[in-house]
């Protein structure tokens, strides 16, 4: 029991020494304040968060996410081909792809796929 306690105390001491050394040897300065801010891509974190955002860009992002997830859902259909009969497999595949095509036509009718604004 004392051996376990000694090993635990030594590991705590080593980790504390490492953290103190890292704190003392790091070269952080006041000028690195911008790097530690939440936004590094040109946004001012101190300004208002209510800036106008392109709704078209948001809708294209949603379309990308939908079709990205669709690929992840199509992959399990391939091994399913060996587990069930061809008739059941084809019904499942056609139904899934039909839902995606209907969604694509709906996005097309809503002019979400129009890239020029």
Image (spheres, grey):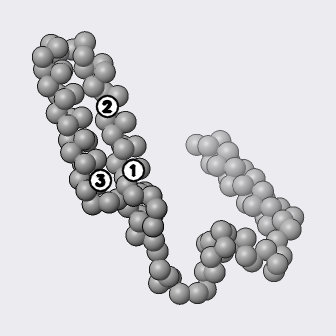
Helix or strand or loop: what does disc 3 sit on? helix
Displayed quadrant of residue 24: bottom right
Q: Earlier in the sequence, mark 3 or mark 1?
A: 1
Compared with 110, 65 (above or below) is above
- Residue at image point 35% right, 28% down: 75
Compared with 25, 34 (above or below) is below
- Residue at image point 20% right, 37% down: 98
Quarter in which the N terminus is drawn:
top right
Q: Which mark is residue 57?
A: none
Q: CA distance from mark 3 to mark 2?
A: 22 Å
Q: Position of residue 79 (x, y in %)?
A: 30, 19
Q: Position of residue 48 (x, y in %)?
A: 53, 87
Q: CA distance from mark 1 to mark 2?
A: 14 Å
For the question of whether residue 36 can be seen, the reply is yes
Can you name the residue that lies furthest to the front here?
116
Q: Name the residue carrying label 1.
A: 65
Does the residue at mark 1 contact the one at mark 2 (Cβ under 8 Å)?
Answer: no
Q: Position of residue 52 (x, y in %)?
A: 47, 80
Q: Position of residue 94 (x, y in %)?
A: 19, 29
- Name the foreground residue: 77 vs 1: 77
Point out the frontmost of discs 3 and 1. 3
Helix or strand or loop: what does disc 2 sit on? helix
Q: Name the residue carrying label 3.
A: 108
Q: Name the residue carrying label 2.
A: 74
Q: Residues within 10 Å of mark 1 (few under 14, many from 20)?
A: few
Compared with 39, 18 (above or below) is above
């Amino acid at each position: 029991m004392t051996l376990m306690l000694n090993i635990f105390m030594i590991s705590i001491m080593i980790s504390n020494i490492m953290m103190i050394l890292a704190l003392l040897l790091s070269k952080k300065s006041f000028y690195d304040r911008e790097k530690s801010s939440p936004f590094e891509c040109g946004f001012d974190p101190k300004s208002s968060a209510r800036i106008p955002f392109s709704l078209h860009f948001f809708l294209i992002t949603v379309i990308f996410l939908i079709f990205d997830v669709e690929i992840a859902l199509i992959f399990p259909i391939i091994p399913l081909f060996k587990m069930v009969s061809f008739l059941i497999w084809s019904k499942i595949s056609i139904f899934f792809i039909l839902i995606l095509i209907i969604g694509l036509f709906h996005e097309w009718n809503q002019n979400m796929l129009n890239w020029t604004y």
